[in-house]
């Protein structure tokens, strides 16, 4: 399910933020969004991510991520209430 999560986050970053790569071969990728687009909401995901990716990810995984996601969102609101950039994902080809 990790590949589907990574795809979702990258699509979200492409739609609502900025995605940087190290080269055309994508050995390294980083996706950033401003704090106005975080946390990711259901409707924003629907607008940004193909339904096939959302469907593949949603099979059992999304429910397990609700509790950690709520905690992360609460900590984010508490400790970073100001405008800022948020690093959604960073990855490199090993």
Image (cartoon, rainbow, N blue to C red):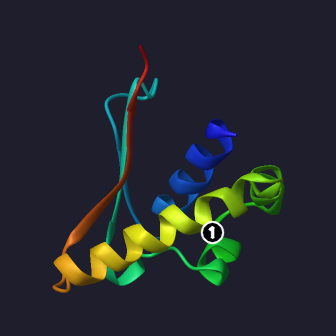
What is the quadrant of the N terminus in the image? top right
Of 89 and 16, the residue lying toward us:
89
Answer with left or right where residue 38 lies relative to residue 78: right
Front residue of 18 and 9 = 9
Quarter occupied by residue 35: bottom left
Name the residue at 49% across, 60% down: 14
Residue 43 position within the rendered picture, expressed as x and y whole percent measured from the top left: 66, 83
Q: Is residue 51 left or right of residue 20?
A: right
> Callout 1 environment at 10 Å: few (<14), some (14 to 19), or many (20+)?
some
Quarter of the image where the C terminus is located:
top left
Residue placed at 81% from the left, 50% from the top? 56
Q: Position of residue 15 (x, y in %)?
A: 52, 67
Assign a secondary structure to mark 1: helix
Residue found farthest to the top? 94
Q: Residue 4: x and y, percent?
A: 68, 44
Above or below for 10 versus 70: above
Left or right of residue 93: residue 64: right
Residue matched to label 1: 48
Task: Give 14 or 42, whichever is nearer the viewer.
Answer: 42
Q: In the image, residue 2 lies at what x, y percent?
A: 62, 38
Which residue is painted at 78% across and 58% down in the image? Answer: 58
- Give me the residue at 71% from left, 63% from top: 63
Which quarter of the figure has residue 3? top right
> Relative to 64, does residue 23 appear above or below in the rendering?
above
């Amino acid at each position: 399910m990790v590949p589907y999560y990574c795809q979702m986050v990258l699509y979200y970053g492409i739609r609502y933020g900025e995605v940087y790569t190290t080269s055309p071969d994508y050995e390294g990728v980083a996706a950033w969004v401003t704090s106005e687009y975080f946390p990711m909401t259901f409707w924003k995901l629907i607008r940004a991510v193909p339904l096939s990716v959302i469907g593949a990810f949603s099979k059992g995984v999304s429910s397990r991520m609700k509790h950690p996601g709520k905690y992360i969102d609460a900590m984010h609101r508490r400790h970073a209430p100001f405008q800022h950039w948020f690093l959604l994902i960073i990855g490199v080809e090993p």
